Image: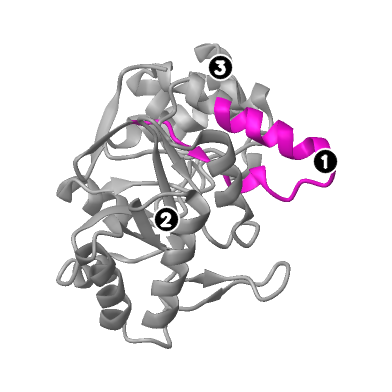
């Protein structure tokens, strides 16, 4: 991994993170041991920003990370609350202040920590006043249970509103080479020095079959996935991609993308793959 780093609040991390969501949902007993090996290998490779959520495996993802990595020496574990899974495939926001507080307490217990370094509101609940959701998060900071607050899937107006109540240090929105609907949010974060954490940074490989992408990848001596991640790192100095995988081979491939240099011509051709909204 190269030495490119970013401040999230006062916390300093490499600009290639790891999304842990895919480490849970294993079907066989050996899968858990494999998942633990992947998490530990990420840290061995220099990854020090790992993303999880209380909804991933209904808490099992956080518990797995605790088993694999606690006490997290030098590793920032970012978790999220406010998005529930009533049934498989169904996601429902829940921003009631009492629920957010309870969820955060459970995160602390599962991660075996006394303070969450970065707690992100997984989704804004339209049924609850935004100020009340933010107030619950601010209270957790005031009590010393949370160090920093982030938001997920928000617009620029929502981000501006939120910053009236809490110091927002990160935004986690869906964004990748072929899905740039949150371009304005990324630009705002870049201007304000807020970390931008794109989820699904490789677009599930949907654009991997692109002939142009394949040509540029061959020029750069990289895979399509590596090219997609490198483009994100070049796009803005506040971007921290969090590619997820349950494979050590893919993990090593993704982390290696942090050292990939692209020419201005290559960056321009890649950007043309997805016209701005």
Q: Which residue is mark 2?
A: 173
| Res. 254 in view | no
The quarter of the picture where the N terminus appears is top left
37 in magenta? yes
186 in magenta? no
Nearest to the observer: residue 200 or residue 215 = 200
Foreground disc of the pair 1, 3: 1
**Label annotation for residue 222:** 3
The quarter of the picture where the C terminus appears is bottom left
**In the image, what residue occupies the spot 57% across and 62% down?**
55
Q: Which range is magenta?
A: 14-40
Foreground disc of the pair 3, 2: 2
Quarter occupied by residue 9: top left
Q: Secondary structure at mark 1?
A: helix
Relative image position of residue 86 (x, y in whole percent): 66, 76
**In the image, what residue occupies the spot 53% across and 43% down?**
66
Q: CA distance from mark 1 to mark 3?
A: 34 Å
Q: Which residue is mark 1?
A: 29
Dots 1 and 2: beta carbons under 8 Å? no
Nearest to the observer: residue 121 or residue 172 = 121
């Amino acid at each position: 991994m190269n030495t490119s780093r970013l401040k999230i609040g006062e916390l300093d991390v490499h600009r290639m993170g790891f999304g842990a969501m895919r480490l849970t949902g294993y079907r066989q007993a050996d899968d858990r041991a494999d998942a633990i090996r992947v998490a530990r290998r990420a840290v061995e490779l220099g990854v020090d920003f790992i993303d999880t959520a209380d909804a991933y495996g209904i808490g099992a993802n956080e518990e797995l990370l605790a088993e694999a990595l606690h006490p997290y020496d030098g590793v920032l574990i970012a978790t999220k609350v406010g998005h529930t899974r009533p049934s498989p495939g169904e996601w429902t926001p829940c921003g009631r202040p009492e629920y957010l507080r309870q969820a955060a307490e459970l995160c602390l217990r599962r991660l075996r920590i006394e303070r969450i370094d970065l707690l992100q509101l997984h989704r804004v609940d339209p049924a609850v006043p935004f100020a009340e959701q933010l107030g619950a998060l601010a209270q957790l900071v005031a009590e010393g249970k949370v160090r920093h607050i982030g938001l997920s899937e928000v617009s620029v107006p929502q981000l501006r509103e939120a910053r009236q109540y809490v110091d927002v240090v990160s935004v986690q929105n869906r964004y990748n080479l072929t899905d740039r609907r949150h371009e304005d949010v990324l630009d705002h974060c870049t201007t304000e020095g807020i970390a931008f954490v794109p989820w699904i940074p490789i677009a599930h490989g949907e654009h991997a079959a692109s002939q142009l992408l394949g040509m540029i990848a061959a020029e750069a001596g990289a895979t399509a996935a590596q090219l997609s991640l490198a483009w994100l790192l070049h796009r803005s100095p506040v971007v921290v991609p969090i590619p997820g995988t349950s494979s050590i081979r893919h993990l090593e491939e993704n982390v290696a993308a942090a050292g990939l240099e692209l020419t201005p011509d290559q960056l321009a051709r890649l950007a043309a793959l997805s016209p701005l909204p």
